[in-house]
Image (cartoon, rainbow, N blue to C red):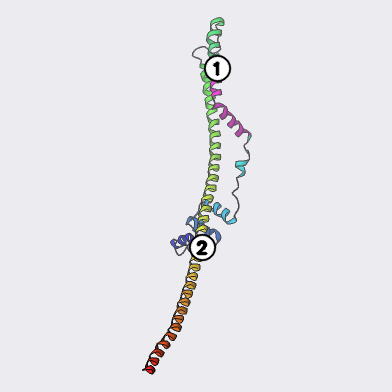
Amino acid sequence: MAAETRLRRLPMSDALPTTPTDNLSQELLGKPYDELTPIQKSVIDLICAEAPAEVGAHLKLDDRTFWQRLADSVAAVGGSWGFIGGFFVMLVIWVGLNVLILGRYISHPFDPYPFIFLNLLLSMLAAIQAPVIMMSQNRAAAKDRLQAEHDYMVNLRAELEIMRLHDKLDELRSREVEALMVQQTEALKLLKDEVAKMSGASKLKAIAGAKPLAKTRTKAPAHAAKKG
């Protein structure tokens, strides 16, 4: 019933699909198959084939290159509290070595205040680390986008399958109701026939009982006339 209702709402040009995929796309999404997005087409194809949704190889296997693994490692280390703590300890050692030890006792520090060489190293580290972290983030974003597309496909298929299940349940319920109505109609018809037979039999009995009574009534006046 629900599927017929959807088909009635569609234009006449779309009411008669030519392929099972067109039929499903019209029934579930209300669009022709050619107007669907690639993900929706893949979902319709999986439903038609009754095949499970497979996870892509890019989501199951680690197909990263050496440089991609290196970028991920640099991003993982550079974005941790361990890196911050270690970097802070290195700065303290650098400043203490040049100011307290070499500057006070040797008078020839390799990077005296205001630590120009240290600033150069920090600038170089930031210039190299930032693009590496961005490369890792871009690759992770691309993988997350593929994972989101796969999740959307699975959720869409689950929703469409639930819609089909509801349609089938509605159709079964309507058939059961129709069969129950037919049975009730037949039962009422049989009951009416039985009532008609019973009423006919009671009328015949009443007529058969009335005839002897009429005969006795006619015989009684005749006997009274003879006596008179």
User: Is 20 part of what is drawn in magenta?
Assistant: no
Residue range of the region highlighted in magenta in the rendering: 66-90
Decide whether the magenta segment is chiefly helix, strand or loop. Answer: helix
Looking at the image, which residue is at 56% across and 4% down?
105
Could you tell me residue 207's position as x and y percent?
A: 44, 83
Query: Foreground mark, 2 or 1?
Result: 2
Q: Amino acid at mark 1?
A: Val
Residue under circle 1? Answer: 89
Farthest residue in the top direction?
105
Picture quadrant of residue 5: bottom left
Assess whether mark 1 and mark 2 are in contact (beta carbons under 8 angstroms).
no
Above or below residue 54? Residue 20 is below
**Residue 112 numbered tag:** none
Tell me the element at label 2: helix
Q: CA distance from mark 2 to mark 1?
A: 78 Å
Looking at the image, which residue is at 52% across and 9% down?
99
Residue under circle 2? Answer: 176
Task: Name the quarter where the C terminus is drawn.
Answer: bottom left
Picture quadrant of residue 81: top right
Going from N to C along the chain, the mark reached first, 2 or 1, is 1
